[in-house]
Amino acid sequence: MLSYRLATGFSLVAAVLAVLWIDEWFAPWYPLWAIASSVALVMAAREMVGLMTASVGRPSASTVIAGTLVVGLANWWPHVIAIANGMPMGEPNALSYDPMAPVNALAWPLWAFVAVLMATFLSQSLQFAKPGNAMTTIASTILAIAYVGLLGSFMIQHRWLDGSHHGVIPLMILVATAKGSDTGAYTVGRLFGKHKLWPVLSPSKTVEGALGGLIFAVIAAALVVGFARMALHTAVLSWKETIGYGIVVGTAAQLGDLMESMIKRDGEVKDADTIIPGFGGLLDILDSLLFAGPVGYGYWLLFGI
């Protein structure tokens, strides 16, 4: 199982790196990142609908998938508008990099989420026939969209964080730290785990695995920062800030994994899907990033820009 996880994990990282490298030709609107993110969000949204349907939720599958896609694509709106207003492609620095720009950019997916929220209410009102189902459907639908689309927007927005490599370094530090935490927790837990971490949510996770995950997270963050400093000659986080990033974001990643475990346990489902060898579903891969994304984004705004 570990070999499958490692092989699949490295393949996914290689695919992400290829997308980011090719997309540099199309800065700052990154069409391949848009396609990859949209496919990932749609797949994760579909899996989320299945998980919630297995418990007490009755989400509208079409609304969840469409709403998640709208919220995700809203992250591109300011860049598409800038191009429409005459900013030439291939010149990423044509966008203003004022300190509040990354915060202001989040208004677009937030507005999209508000629009989806209102549309969901309207849609259910048009379908209303008898009491007992409407509010459950609305609540579960909006929760699914917020969980996948709104939290996922923070990971997507890493692509436009300030820097000479156009967000590649912040995004790779995020992915490396979150997945390093996952890999470390799984590996150390399998080899040395004895004390249960949170058995009511995930019986297999251990305290030893959690600590191992944090160590792996710090190492992964340090490796990316070291590469950025030595190979790309890019000043990013200091070494002290890198250690802090590994601990804080690694902790958030493990919480994200546990929260998805709660969702699956509530529906008595082992995996979100079976499409990815060694992992399960796409949501089983993204769960740590959904929680790590907002935390990593905030950390980068404080220390990385």
Image (cartoon, rainbow, N blue to C red):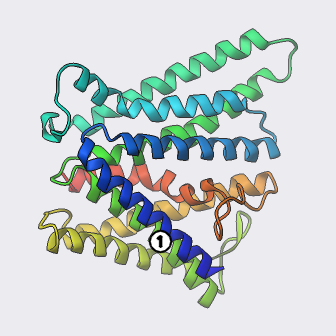
At x 54%, y 75%, the residue is: 7
- In this view, the residue farthest toward the top is 126
Which residue is situated farthest in the bottom direction here?
A: 192
- Percent from the top left, x then y, of residue 193? 63, 85
Residue at 36% x, 74% y is 220
Q: In the shown orientation, is residue 35 left or right of residue 173?
A: right
Question: Where is residue 96 shown, x and y percent of the image?
Answer: 14, 34
> At x 48% / y 56%, what residue is drawn?
289
Residue 48, horizontal then vertical, whole percent: 67, 45
Q: Image quadrant for the N terminus?
A: bottom right
User: Helix, strand, or loop for circle 1?
Assistant: helix
Q: Position of residue 39 (x, y in %)?
A: 54, 43
Total number of numbered discs in the rendering: 1
Amino acid carrying mark 1 in the image? Phe
302, above or below 203, in the image: above
Question: Can the viewer see residue 24 in this picture?
Answer: yes
Q: 86 or 121: which is nearer to us?
A: 86
Neighbour class for label 1 at 10 Å: few (<14), some, many (≥20)?
few
Residue at position x 86%, y 11% from top? 129
Foreground pick, 163 / 110: 163
Q: Is residue 207 visible?
A: no
Q: Is residue 213 above or below residue 104?
A: below
Q: Quadrant of residue 190?
A: bottom right
Q: Is residue 248 left or right of residue 23?
A: right
In the picture shown, does residue 47 fall above or below 177?
above
Circle 1 sits on which residue? 10
Instruction: Tell me where residue 217 sits by quadrant.
Output: bottom left
User: Left or right: where does residue 284 sit relative to residue 252?
Assistant: right
